Image (spheres, grey):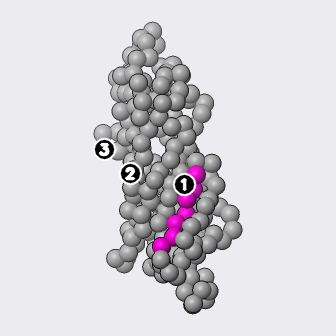
Amino acid sequence: MIIVMAKGITLSFLFYGFLFLGLSATVYPPKLIAAPAPGGMGIGPVCPPACPPNPANCDANLVITPTQDLQFGSIIAPVAGTGSVIVDTGGNPTPTGGVLLIGAGTTAAIFSMSTGPFNCTGRVINTITVGPTATLTHASLPATMTVHTFTTNPAQGGAFDPAVPLTVGATLDVGAFQTPGSYSGTYLVTVTFQ
């Protein structure tokens, strides 16, 4: 099993002007950056190349490396109720509940996956899980936002191919009159083979 802790989810709100009854905010892209979970990134004992790529060897030697951040783009928070920004695994955004997107700039997270000397190509991916949630905490005030409903491509049950990256999307909840400022948090990625 590989657990990669991604940290550095950041959001910045700046006053954008007076829209929708006076208050709005621009949210700048968050950074989702993978870093090793306690105990490393799953680098295990290396079997000589003649050994078969059984699931234990594939799991123990799987390395997941971030190559692109998950970004929710620049947004204006709603003034009533809650809204969200959904970024799919292709980086396409969908705002809901009064959240407005300003310009482009959304991307899915991208991770490369490798099993080192083992040819685990074609092995069934037993588990790919992310999250289940990430709490984004304001840098200096008691305010939070939640990232949840992470999606992946490929999904569990697919065949592993080191030439195909793992992409991750998610949903960001944005509150009415969300407190301006920078937010940060962490999330986990878990991958195992069958």
The amino acid on which the numbered mark 1 sits, given as a three-letter code, is Leu
Q: Nearer the viewer, mark 3 or mark 2?
A: 2
Q: Which label sits on residue 38?
A: 3
Looking at the rendering, in which quadrant would you find the C terminus? top left
Distance from the alpha carbon under mark 3 to that under mark 2 = 18 Å
* Residue closest to the eye, 40 or 62: 62
What is the CA distance from the residue labelled 3 to the residue labelled 1?
22 Å
Residue 22 has which mark?
A: none
Say which label, 1 or 2, has the lower sequence index: 1
Task: For the N terminus, give its image quadrant.
Answer: top left
Provide the residue designation for mark 1.
70
- In contact (CB < 8 Å): disc 1 and disc 2: no
Q: Decide: is 170 above or below 55.
A: below
Q: Is residue 171 left or right of residue 4?
A: right
To which residue does mark 2 refer? 132
Q: Position of residue 169 (x, y in %)?
A: 53, 51
Q: Secondary structure at mark 3?
A: loop
